[in-house]
Image (tube, rainbow, N blue to C red):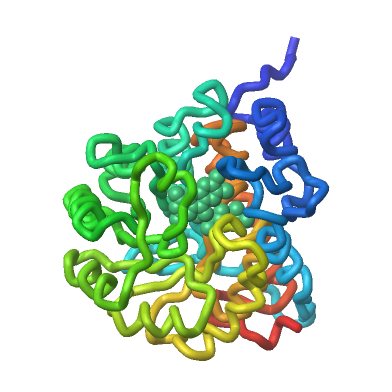
Amino acid sequence: MGEMIMTIENMSLEEIREIAKSKLMGICGVYKDCDGSPMRICQGQSYGKPLKFGGIGSGASFNNNFLALKNYHLKMKVIGEHFEPDTSYEFFGNKLSMPIMGASVAGVNSFGGESVISEKEFCRAVVLGCKEAGTVGWRGDTYTYSLEKTFGLDAIRETGGWGVKIVKPRDQDMIMKLYHMAEKIGCIAVGTDVDGCESFAMTTHNQPVFRKSVDDLKELVSSTKLPVIIKGIMSVEDALIAQEAGAAAIVVSNHGGRVLDHTPGTASVLPVIVQKVKNKLHIFVDGGIRTGYDVLKMLALGADAVLIGRDMVRAAVGAGIYGVKTHMEYLKQTLSKAMKMTNCKSLNDISQDIIS
Ligand SMILES: Cc1cc2nc3c(=O)[nH]c(=O)nc-3n(C[C@H](O)[C@H](O)[C@H](O)COP(=O)(O)O)c2cc1C
């Protein structure tokens, strides 16, 4: 009598992560801190092998994302009138419930196998789960994708275009074709992760990727009516080139520490880039962001919004669409709490003043 039956719809985030932990055994420890520390099972250099869930080489870039964020501290300002923070954010004309979106992660099936999660299921979980939480799921690109196999775009199509498609720096023609498909589906924006120009997964599967010049980027920007996002910016020089090319936004990102060993953490380079291009284009950031407190730090450092990578995988593997929705809601709750404790009623109130 009265025995509670556990269904997906009443699972807590902790339970979702426990399920992910068992399904991701040997791939991801679903640790309390996903910090890229050398002791973690995902870390460690595997010579001549594709990356799994960790960072490239020594893992320093992944670890630096975590350490850079940890270095900043929030200023408590709790005396004053009571209020409920407004976390809403406008993303290219669309009102979102929070300035937090699902990052463009792809190829999750390649390190877990279809029994962990299929690429189709993963894309649906991120896009539909983010939508249910009032935000947007971005979708990535990898060697299993082609003009015929468009897992991310298929999921976005299901929502009538509620998503962003990020295409690897493939040859120009192929990128433009994929942008065009995204435009037809009605995507909110498209973009390219320019830091994927040395992708091991792509090159070892006969899918060439390239460095992109300012003229290449200009060609991509003028090929579509959609806003174009350049992802993988870690220097002022590249940020200025993206601006010159007419990009609508950049993502300050080192790909979760997966593309070049020994880069700084994104929270360290963000303020320098913000100083040069703020208000010229939208600035998004990712890397090591695990809670709303981390989100608030990135916003205080000048980002307009943030992306969440690895935690979307754990949430989707744990409980699909519901898992992603639940995880996003957790991030929103902790951001709201952090805003209240630092006297920020809305995103406009967040500034460098609350961080040290
Ligand atoms: C398994 C995996 C696959 C990824 N695939 C892509 C991709 O296809 N395109 C892309 O732009 N970024 C990709 N990324 C990078 C993420 O978009 C994001 O930049 C990064 O995961 C953020 O760091 P975090 O995982 O610490 O949150 C991938 C990351 C991981 C962990």
Residue 204: quarter of image: top left
Above or below, 298 relative to 23: below
Q: Nearer the viewer, residue 120 or 114?
A: 114
Q: Residue at x 71, y 19 (%)?
A: 4
| Quarter the N terminus occupies | top right
Q: Residue furthest front?
A: 48
Q: Residue at x 69, y 38 (%)?
A: 28
- Residue 289 % position (x, y): 64, 60
- Residue 284 % position (x, y): 49, 70
| Quarter the C terminus occupies | bottom right
Q: Nearer the viewer, residue 107 or 344?
A: 107
Residue 187: quarter of image: bottom left
Is 338 left, or right, of 230 in this rendering?
right
For the question of whether residue 308 can be seen, the reply is: no
Q: Nearer the viewer, residue 210 or 351?
A: 210
Above or below, 228 relative to 235: above
- Residue 260 % position (x, y): 58, 62
Is 84 left, or right, of 21 in this rendering?
left
- Residue 295 % position (x, y): 63, 66
Is 318 left, or right, of 211 in this rendering?
right
For the question of whether residue 353 can be seen, the reply is: yes
Q: Residue at x 74, y 15 (%)?
A: 3
Q: Across the whole image, how many numbered discs are drawn on residues?
A: 0
Q: Nearer the viewer, residue 1 or 341?
A: 341
Above or below, 138 relative to 319: below
Q: Residue furthest right?
A: 39
Residue 335: quarter of image: bottom right
Q: Residue furthest top?
A: 1
